[in-house]
Amino acid sequence: MKLVIGIVRPEKANDVLESLYRADVRGVSMSRVQGHGGELERVETYRGTTVQMGLAEKVRFEIAVSDEFVQPTVEALCEGARTGEVGDGKIFVVPLEQAVRIRTGDTDMGAVTPVDK
Amino acid sequence: MLSAVAEIDTGDTAWMLVATALVLMMTPALGLFYAGLVRSKNTLNTFMMCIGAIAVAAVTWAAVGYSIAFDGDGSLIGGLGNAFLNGVDFAPRDGTTIPELLFMAFQATFCIITVALVSGAVVERMRFGAFLVFAALWSVLVYAVLAHWAFGGGWLQAGGTLDFAGGIPVEMGSGFSALAAALVVGARKDYGRQALLPHNAMYVLLGAGLLWFGWFGFNGGSGFSTGDASVLAFVNTLLTPACTLLVWFALDLIRGRKVTAIGAATAIIVGCVAITPAGGFISPGWAMLLGALAALPSYAIIVWRTRTRVDETLDVLAAHGLAGFTGILFIGLFAELAWNGVSDGLFYGNAAQLGDQALAALVTPIYAFVATFILLKLIGAVMPLRASEREEGVGMDVVQHGEEAYVTGEGAILITTEAGVDTERLVSDPG
């Protein structure tokens, strides 16, 4: 069981959701974050004040999956989020100790497998 | 009016000064309305198209637009006698009791908002520079020509077509041009694939409210006086949109079981548009019926359009083109000599008036659509009309203007020093 964390461009978030759906990955949470990963910074000017925006808007996906779903999930994230330019984001896969479905108390495999499957 | 010695009337002039300011305010109000309807990453760009319309159309109007619309009574276009405001001064404009200079400014604000209206078809992907070029040419080649036909003594007006405040040049002119613009520029890259939702319904409501407020100057000023026609148009501008709102509520209820706020904002626009051509020609009672009826075609087209591949993004055709069409035809049915002192419609025994109105309702859409289509194709041959897919994804605010509407300032590093821009710290290009 792993937690897959994908940090992607906000404008690609819908594409990621679409490719995750196609890969049969259900159970996703996403949040808006700001970050910096070495991409070129954009310069903006407000009434003569020029600033370099050091942090870029990103969307962070968190997806808890059983082991056989790790690879499809990572592939779906890459496929949905890639533009080929600097700033496409990162994926982190981390081990997951335990998962609990609050409604039923199901744990682990039972908890990360959507009920509609 | 054939009065040999026309004189300036101070009351009329005072009202027209106010009305002109009211109509100018409608363009930033439209900016709010439009900006609320787009996604947050395109807020500033959408508003800036309206600001750009003020900048460009005010200048083109003073340069040649006013002259083409209002110099002489040529059949198709006016002359160039008033180009660069030559001879436009404090003497009364023929047929009015206000200075021609003020008449010119009042008409300028109409040209400005019409150009801004068309932008609603192409927001979220058209390049700002290309839009400014389009605005300059369109304001002269399409708006000024239609204004001449309807107001400046051109063939429609000479033939008896009635248009009180701009159903022909403003409403049908913008609506059918918007359709052409949407077809030439093309749909947004995610149109029909992803939900592209309004990002701030409050802007939409506030914008609609300010537009309605400004419309009292738009319609109420189109009599160029404080006379009966102006009062009638002013009052109809209150009654018609109210009826449109009620019918729109009912349509929303039938269709989705809820009355929507953005639907209400749209209804206000549709009602104001419908009464624009008819304001000074029909009785308040008929004006209320017009408001109720005008909701139906516009509502139907908005529902239908979103299921098509035509990304006429902010429904200028439905809200302006179609509602203007309804209003123009309605004059032919219910104009009443007893109220307007000009002409009766079919309902009062003058079938010819309906024919005159139908002619305008047929010809205006064709001219607006074809001229805009060709104009944008030509501009597109010289410069790219739209931003790249990547830029569209990032958003037009950052790409076109280097600003964001809702910037937090977190992570922003100051690179302007007292000596100017610190190029040492400037490591990259925008984007």
Image: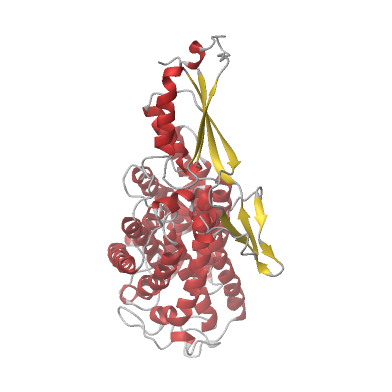
**B265 or B295: nearer the viewer:** B265
Q: Position of residue B258 (x, y in %)?
A: 49, 34
- Residue B223 can be seen, yes or no: no
Q: Is B414 situated left or right of B343 in this image?
A: right
Residue B323 sits above or below residue A100 on the image: below
Residue A16 sits above or below residue B14 on the image: above
Q: Residue at x 66, y 47 (%)?
A: B410
**B250 or B311: nearer the viewer:** B311
Q: Which residue is drawn at 38% across and 85% down?
A: B72
Which quadrant of the structure image shows residue B346? bottom left
Q: Position of residue B215 (x, y in %)?
A: 53, 61
Q: Position of residue B241 (x, y in %)?
A: 50, 52
Residue A28 sits above or below residue A89 on the image: above
Which quadrant of the structure image shows residue A102? top right
Quarter of the image that includes the N terminus of chain B: bottom left
User: How many numbered marks does the figure carry?
Assistant: 0
